[in-house]
Amino acid sequence: MQDLDLAVVGNSVIATLIDRRARMVWSCWPRFDGDPLFCSLLNDSAGDGATGFFDVVLANQTGATQGYVGNSAILTTMLTDAAGGAVRITDLAPRFKQYGRIFRPTMLLRRIEPVAGTPRIRIRLRPRFDYGALEPTRTYGSNHIRFLSPTQALRLTTDAPISYIAEETPFLLTGPVNLVLGADEPFHANLAETAREFRERTEDYWQDWVRYLSVPFEWQDAVIRAAITLKLCAFEETGGIVAALTTSIPEAPNSGRTWDYRYCWLRDAFFVVHALNRLGATLTMEDYIRYITNVADSAEDGRLRPVYRIVPGRPLPERVVDGLAGYRGMGPVRDGNQAEDQVQNDAYGSVILAAAQMFFDRRLPRPGDLALFQRLERLGERAALSAFEPDAGPWEFRGRKSVHTFSCVMCWVACDRLAKIAAALGLPDRTTYWRHAADGIHSTVLERAWNQQLNSFVATLDGTEIDATLLLMQEVGFVSATDPRFLGTVAAVERTLKRGDYLLRYAVADDFGMPETAFTVCTFWYIDTLVAVGRRDEARALFEKILARRNHVGLLSEDIDSASGVLWGNFPQTYSMVGLIVSAMRLSKSWEAAFWRGW
């Protein structure tokens, strides 16, 4: 049965999910939100008649081990057979510096090497088009196979015997073979030498990128893997950052909560930028500012949608894909996301928070200026107007609207940070203007979001429900961590949302019933809150527990079953990897303390 023990290889243009046996089960082309050429992740079958994957079958296989090559996005899988034979499979998407820019082609490179014995393998390459509905036409050359549809064309170039691959015939692997899957273009270079060069230069790129990260002293491997994963989810061409690389992995078994996350949520992207900034990877922020500047300039009356394509412009109409059964047969499978039509007023604060560092970070070669500030002011005006308008909220309720506390707080954030930016730019009139706007929102939220009977802030103004975003009120500076009202809120969250070691988003029925699984980033928010209120030992213990829930290569999905620890939801979830990074940095011993006072 398919599970989320999956690894990711990619290059910030495409990404591929690979299971423990080196089967590529999910890969969208020519970019993250494109057609899934490998879609067996949502068909849950890999038998002889299955399609939508790329694998290597070792005869009499008895075992498999898998891991990344050092601090890179290069994956190796070792398959072993009953006679002691072994095969190593190396997968990567090339990415390295060339001619003063980043070379990141739409290409997957797979190398298969015999390691021990006389392994007998079968190579099966079965892409599909149009979300699994269309089997491609194939044509063959002396060293390549072309896969054609009315809208796409792929070419596999290889030094393995073409007939063995075309007919999926088992053969003895007596030496290394290389397979390059990419655009339908002739390969005008020595394949083995090019594959070796691409692998070496890609490894050098990633190790060099990691070398400049400001990682915490503790949990370095976990943080580095999370950071690389976030980088793989950033579409570098435009700066958009996807929430996850998949669509329709259900949040819980048979829940119907299957959503397409291959797009850029402004809220989620801010958290990614925030985490990478803490590590010193500021270029992703600069790319994202470029992205949101384009989005903001095209927004009518300054009104933002909550989610956009990674190439903004075209809409995201949501449809059900009939040709795919779904993860473990649990549909529906969706393409597109209805959330683009929702009102989610927290987006303004998310964008301005992401951009604010441009005005204060002296490392940046192109700091924020008056022109950027004036663009952000358009969004601030909309935030001030929208602060107390009902919306779908951060959890994207489809059947109701309310005045959500988190949305109000993020509108306050928009105005508050604009006041700070205006002060930094030496604009006293604008500083006063935005401070007045922020103070008005602040006082109203303190009055109407506080529930004296519950001794807690609540999820909606004048409401009675609790949700996990209330933990972020101190994170964004709306209240202090020592405020008795915030401490009461933490206690209410614990009473209401904790399930074992993990937190639900909320504990009330929505359009799909009661939530069943814990939302992973909420548990990280709780860990951060425990640190903020002085309960550091509890926070460390809980952090170690959630680290243990990562899959075999250190990745997390959106949700965790609090009873079984099984991962559910879209994968890998940027929110979850962000939470890991931020919590680790807050909990870790400092490098100075470790080296000067011992660890």
Image: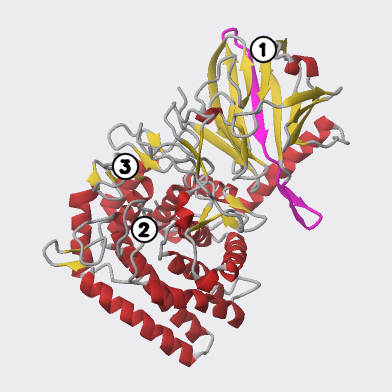
Of the two numbered discs 2 and 3 on the same chain, state the one appearing first in sequence. 2
**Relative height, residue 282 to residue 442 (above, below):** above
Label 1's element? loop
Q: In which quarter of the view is residue 67 placed?
A: top right
What amino acid is found at the position of numbered circle 3 in the picture? Phe
* In the image, residue 7 lies in the stretch drawn in magenta: no
> Residue 587's quadrant in the figure?
bottom left
Up the image or down, 560 lies above or below 473; here it is above
The CA span between labels 2 and 3 is 15 Å
- In the foreground, 124 or 223: 124
Q: Earlier in the sequence, mark 1 or mark 3?
A: 1
Local packing at callout 1 (Cα closer than 10 Å; few below 14, some 14-19, many 20+) is many
In the rendered structure, are the residues bearing label 2 and label 3 in contact, judged by CB atoms less than 8 Å apart?
no
- Badge 1 is on which residue? 119
**Disc 2 from disc 1: Cα separation:** 56 Å
Q: How is the image coloured?
A: secondary structure
Q: Is 94 covered by the magenta stretch?
A: yes
Disc 2 residue crowd, few under 14, some 14–19, many 20+, Cα 10 Å? many
Q: Position of residue 142 (x, y in %)?
A: 87, 22
Q: Residues within 10 Å of mark 3 (few under 14, many from 20)?
A: few
- Provide the residue designation for mark 3: 512
Mark nearer the viewer, 1 or 3: 3
Q: Are marks 2 and 1 in contact (CB under 8 Å)?
A: no
Question: Which residue occupies 23% across, 68% down?
Answer: 449
Residue where numbered disc 2 is placed: 392
Q: Is residue 68 visible?
A: yes
| Front residue of 9 and 337 | 337
Does residue 190 appear to the left or right of 443 in the view shown? right
User: Can residue 216 be seen here?
Assistant: no
